Image: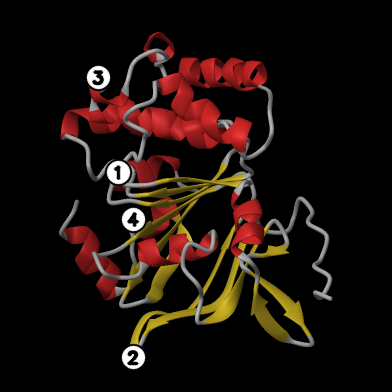
Amino acid sequence: MATAQPAPNSTSPMIAIKDVWKSYGRLDVLKGINLEVPRSSVTCLIGPSGSGKSTLLRCVNHLEQVTAGRIEVDGELIGYREKNGTLYEISERDAAKQRRDIGMVFQHFNLFPHRTVLDNIVEAPVQVKGESRAEAEKRALDLLDQVGLAAKAKAYPVQLSGGQQQRVAIARALAMRPKLMLFDEPTSALDPELVSEVLNVMRHLAEEGMTMLVVTHEMGFAREVADQVAFMDGGVVVEHGPARDVITNPQHERTQGFLSSLL
């Protein structure tokens, strides 16, 4: 029997990352990460390529197995069950159930090219959560309206710009009614003029109180929207604190060097 998890409450963090390590053979990608993401807040992970940001994000919904440590989302241990102080990996089926409550948006949109925008959004609620087609379509249309694409419901992905496709991908994740949204460089594959339309949707989500963990190089977004920023380098969190403090007045020389190359 798994050890009972503490009941989640409004003061407990939505994400609790505790001494997490991730290794590939002898290569340590994450080295004892400790980080909490409060409920209804936005946390941005920044840092150079290869610092472990995306790996950490993927560990949060168990797309990557942790080598050591633990991650809890809303008080629930992710990817494992605990028995007599030992963690045992849960089945893929059970991991998939946990992911229902965690929306994730990747660098690339991963839309089904042979399905319309509407069909892309309703697929998971109908097939995974068992919603009726009518209920799923109603919510999908509401979400498309929220992301400014109400007129594109019958379009196919190839008929959309990259920014539009990414907004559809966000709507698709929201269709599952997640308690948490993960974003892995959501604007990195976009032409510069299309970045703002995706960031505006994310700003709106933040205003509505969605808990978000975002890997990004968009420092303007991090400064304006994030509640906290964690700068990662070499698999560790080098500096962590309120977004404006970290970005406008970094204390660690590695953070200072990274930001000076961007700002």
Tell me if residue 164 comes above or below residue 110 in the rendering.
above
Q: Which residue is mark 1?
A: 108
Q: Give the mark toward the camera: 2 or 3.
A: 3
Residue 263's spot in the image, x, y percent? 19, 51
> Label 4 crowding class (10 Å Cα cut-off): few <14, some 14-19, many 20+?
many
Q: Residue drawn 49% across and 28% down? A: 121
Tell me if residue 86 comes above or below residue 223 in the rendering.
below
First in sequence: mark 4 vs mark 1: 1
Badge 2 amino acid: Arg
Q: Which residue is mark 3?
A: 159
Badge 4 amino acid: Ile
First in sequence: mark 2 vs mark 3: 2
Residue 28, quarter of the rendered image: bottom left
Q: Answer whether labels 4 and 3 touch (C-beta < 8 Å).
A: no
Q: Secondary structure at mark 2?
A: loop
Of 120 and 19, the residue lying toward us = 120
Residue 237's spot in the image, x, y percent? 41, 73
Please indicate whether residue 60 sits to the left or right of residue 90 in the image: left
Residue 1's spot in the image, x, y percent? 84, 76
Q: Residue drawn 70% across and 56% down? A: 74
Residue 47 can be seen in this image: yes
Q: Which residue is mark 2?
A: 26
